[in-house]
Amino acid sequence: MGDVVLVREKTGDDGAFLNWTLRQVPEVEGAFMAMDVNTGRVLAMQGGFSYQASVFNRATQARRQPGSAFKPFVYAAALDSGYTPATIVVDAPIEINTPDGLWQPQNASGEYYGPTPLRTGIEQSRNLMTIRLAQEIGMETVAEYAERFGVYDDMNPYLSNALGSQETTLFRMVAAYAMFANGGERVEPTLVDRIQDRYGNTIYRHDQRVCTDCADPSLPPGEGPHIESHRTRIMNAVTAYELTSMLEGVVRRGTAAKAIDLPVPIAGKTGTTNEAKDVWFIGFSSNIVAGCYIGYDTPRSMGGASGGGVCAPVFQEFMKPVVDRFGGSEFPVPEGCSFINIDRFSGARLSDDATGDNVQSECFRAGEEPVFGVTFDGGFEVSGDLPLVEEVRSASRNVTTSTGQTATVGEGNASFGTISSGGLY
């Protein structure tokens, strides 16, 4: 007697009452934010379940571990350091001595997959590949990239931070991903677009880009105005496109594939911290970036939660009407991109007319012919009898060659006998 339950009235399509459904105030909290990738205009921000219950803005004030949502910055540093999406990195066990004891990072699956292309590493969010990559290019380089993008003011150069163990805010992460989406130009998020005085004169304008022909009455129908941008470039345009293409793979067939289904190209990255204390998804179209994190205010495990299972559906639900309103397009290809077909399982080069689910048209810097078959192990010694798991391949393993014949490619992983025990050779 005296118990109180929260309910909500449920009605049919005609508005007629159907029944009552139980409701509850969730213990878990989180935040969501969306912004324009070109102007920095914040289109939406939710700092928690209820402002009446808590005025703490978790989008701008809550410092949380981004987990695997940080990995794109490691890969960005690698791509600018001479790696390509087809570069092979070893996915195998690692043991690192730390002041607190032996650290043995693992993949979420608890399994190892052997030599694997970078593209697959980020699509499937492989922790061990990321650690090897960070070791090879140096955590100082990774930290410099993270600080350049504004993810951190001062990132500690510890290998565990390559997996997103250092805290940051959703506000910073969404702003950083916007710079992937717009081709590598610096953009600052803003809640205030413009300020005018009482006479209508603009005394402050956030977007400093110049529209050279917006007032031209002779602009042809359907042709957009020309906008000049003098923003600082913080990332090579080809690197930004390569990374965006890899993050598209996360949505198409990687850790977010089951949750995202939108009519325009979407790129993004999931993030799940240890014991699922924080789960993330940050994604973007050609013009809008949005991100979500969910977790308890006092971090504790959420059981089997994951970024792809919890946050990606939130992104999907938000973006459906956004795409209807703002549209979207293919991500623009920058000058200096040369496309080569590779096998996304083995990293091997394929013919220009190869077809099949395993064929990936990969962007490489024009004039810089990639060297195929080189494998990096990050300086960690590996054994020859590891219990490696065969990468799950699609049924379509056959490709059509330039002569019209059928050939099978990418059979088996490279042998560990062909891999050095450390160093960049």
Image (cartoon, rainbow, N blue to C red):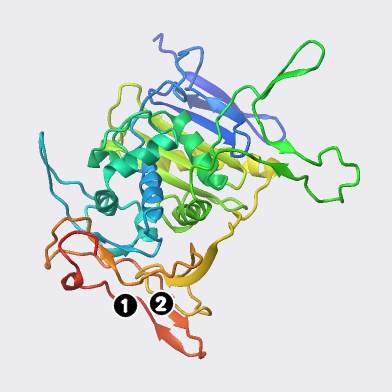
Residue 244 rendering spot, x and y as whole percentages:
50, 52
Front residue of 280 and 212:
212
> Circle 1 — which element?
loop
- Pointer 2 and pointer 1: residues touching (CB < 8 Å)? yes
Residue 11 rendering spot, x and y as whole percentages:
64, 30
> Circle 2 — which element?
loop
Identify which amino acid the numbered label 2 is placed on: Arg
Q: How far apart, in angstroms, are the residues tagged by discs 2 and 1?
A: 9 Å
Q: How many labels does the image show?
A: 2
> In terms of image quadrants, where is residue 207?
top right
- For the question of whether residue 306 can be seen, the reply is no
Quarter of the image for the N terminus: give it. top left
Residue 198 rendering spot, x and y as whole percentages:
79, 10
**Label 2 or label 1, whichever comes before in sequence order:** 2
- Residue shown at 30% from the left, 53% from the top: 126
Residue beneath disc 1? 411
- Residue shown at 47% from the left, 53% from the top: 239
Residue beneath disc 2? 397
Q: Is residue 172 left or right of residue 326?
A: left
Identify which amino acid the numbered label 1 is placed on: Glu
In the rendered view, tell whether residue 55 sits above or below residue 160.
above
- Say few, some or many: other residues with alpha carbon within 10 Å of mark 1 (under 14 / 14 to 19 / 20 or more): few
In the rendered view, tell whether residue 310 sits above or below residue 126.
above
- For the question of whether residue 215 can be seen, the reply is yes
- Say few, some or many: other residues with alpha carbon within 10 Å of mark 2 (under 14 / 14 to 19 / 20 or more): some
Q: Is residue 195 left or right of residue 64?
A: right
Q: In this view, does 95 lie to the left or right of 211?
A: left
- Residue shown at 21% from the left, 49% from the top: 106
Quarter of the image for the C terminus: give it. bottom left
> In terms of image quadrants, where is residue 69?
top left
